[in-house]
C-alpha cells in the first residue's frame, strides 16, 4: 500500500552554497561559484528569483569559509546606492534593488566541515523545524517561462508528499546522471508527474530504470531531517541527500515532476559558458546583439 500523501505549505528554501567550486577553478579560488556573473547578475540571483516567484518567504543559505561575498551581496550597499541616486542613475538603482528578499527573510548557517549535500541540508534543521521545505542547488540554473519551483509547487498542491524535479535526457547519456526509478506500472514517457520508488546513480544504459535525470530542485518533508541526523556516509565518503530520501521513500510518497524549461550546470566550465549565452539571448537590453555575436562567433 502506498504511503499516505503529506501536505504542508512550503515557505522555506534551503540553498547549499558551501562548496568549493573545484570544477571551475581557478576562478573560484577567491570568488564563490554561486557569485560568478551570468550576463549582469550572479548565478545565485537567478535561483533566488526562481524561489521568490514560487512564493518562498525565507531563505536559508548554507555557507562555508570564504563565502562572505554571498551575505554581502544581499545586504544594502549604502555608498553605492547613494552615489547612484545623486547621479540620478535611477534605472540602475531600481534594477539593483528589484526582487531582493525582504529584510529578516534570510538566514546564513555555516557548514563547518565539507561532509556532503545531505549534511549541508541537515545544517538547516533548526530553522526548518517541522515545516516542509524546498532545496535548490544554486549551481543549477533553470530557464523557463514559469519558474521551475513554481511549477513544482503547483504539482505539490495536487499530490503532496515529496517532489523531485526531473527532465528527460537521451538514453545514451543516462550513465552521466542520477535518474529516478518509476513505480511499477508507471508510464513515465507520457506523464509529467510520476510516482517513484527509487533513484539510481549513473546507471549503465541497459540497466537504467528511466531516462529522467534529477535536476537539483526538491520539495521535501521535515521528517527527512531526522533521517539525515544518523545517515551514514555514502558515495565519496560523504552524507548523501539521495540516501536519506531513499529511506524516507519507505514512509512517504515521492513523485518526480517533469518541468518545462532548460537547465544549465554552472558548476562546470562548459555548462557555465552555455548559461551565459542562453541568458544573454533573452536579456531585454542585449538580446539582439548577443544573438548576432553568438552567430558570428559560431561562423
Image (tube, rainbow, N blue to C red):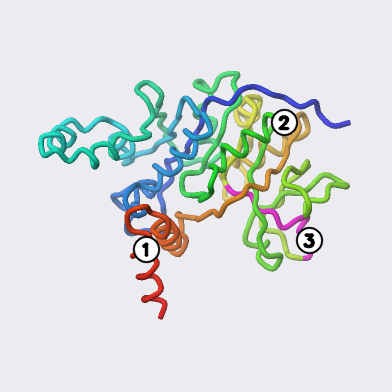
Gap in angstroms between the C-alphas marked 1 and 3: 44 Å
Residue 298 in the image, given as x and y percentages of width and height: 41, 77
Number of the label disc, if any, that sits on residue 288: 1
Q: Look at the numbered disc 3 and give the secondary structure of its residue.
A: helix
Task: Indicate the secondary structure of the residue bearing disc 1.
Answer: helix
Res 158 label: 2
Location of residue 136 in the rendering, given as x and y in whole percent from the top left corner: 52, 40
Circle 3 sits on which residue? 207
Q: Residue at x 69, y 68 (%)?
A: 172
Q: Residue at x 39, y 46 (%)?
A: 34
- The image quadrant that residue 287 belongs to is bottom left
Residue 53, x across and y down, in percent = 49, 35
The tag earlier along the polypeptide, 2 or 3, is 2
Query: Total of numbered circles in the picture?
Result: 3
Stretch of the chain drawn in magenta:
206-215
**Image quadrant for the N terminus?**
top right
Q: Residue 99, located in which quarter of the rendered image? A: top left
Amino acid at each position: 500500500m502506498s504511503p499516505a500523501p503529506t501536505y504542508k505549505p512550503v515557505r522555506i528554501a534551503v540553498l547549499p552554497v558551501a562548496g568549493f567550486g573545484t570544477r571551475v577553478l581557478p576562478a573560484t579560488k577567491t570568488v564563490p561559484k554561486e557569485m560568478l556573473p551570468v550576463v549582469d547578475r550572479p548565478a545565485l540571483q537567478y535561483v533566488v528569483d526562481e524561489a521568490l516567484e514560487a512564493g518562498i518567504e525565507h531563505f536559508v543559505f548554507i555557507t562555508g569559509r570564504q563565502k562572505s561575498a554571498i551575505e554581502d551581496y544581499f545586504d544594502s550597499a549604502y555608498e553605492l546606492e547613494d552615489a547612484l541616486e545623486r547621479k540620478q542613475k535611477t534605472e540602475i538603482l531600481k534594477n539593483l534593488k528589484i526582487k531582493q528578499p525582504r529584510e529578516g527573510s534570510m538566514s546564513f548557517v555555516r557548514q563547518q566541515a565539507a561532509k556532503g549535500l545531505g549534511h549541508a541540508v541537515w545544517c538547516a534543521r533548526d530553522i526548518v523545524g517541522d515545516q516542509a521545505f524546498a532545496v535548490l542547488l544554486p549551481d543549477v540554473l533553470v530557464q523557463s517561462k514559469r519558474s521551475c519551483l513554481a511549477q513544482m509547487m503547483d504539482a505539490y498542491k495536487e499530490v503532496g508528499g515529496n517532489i523531485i524535479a526531473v527532465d528527460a535526457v537521451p538514453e545514451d547519456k543516462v550513465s552521466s546522471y542520477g535518474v529516478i526509478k518509476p513505480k511499477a506500472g508507471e508510464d513515465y514517457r507520457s506523464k509529467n508527474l510520476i510516482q517513484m520508488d527509487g533513484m539510481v546513480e549513473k546507471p549503465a544504459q541497459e540497466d537504467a530504470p528511466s531516462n529522467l535525470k534529477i535536476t537539483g530542485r526538491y520539495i521535501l518533508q521535515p521528517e527527512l531531517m531526522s533521517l539525515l541526523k544518523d545517515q551514514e556516509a555514502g558515495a565519496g565518503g560523504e552524507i548523501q541527500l539521495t540516501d536519506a530520501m531513499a529511506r524516507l521513500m519507505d514512509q512517504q510518497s515521492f513523485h518526480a515532476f517533469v518541468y518545462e524549461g532548460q537547465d544549465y550546470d554552472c558548476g562546470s566550465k562548459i555548462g557555465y559558458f552555455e548559461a551565459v549565452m542562453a541568458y544573454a539571448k533573452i536579456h531585454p537590453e542585449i538580446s539582439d546583439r548577443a544573438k548576432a555575436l553568438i552567430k558570428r562567433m559560431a561562423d
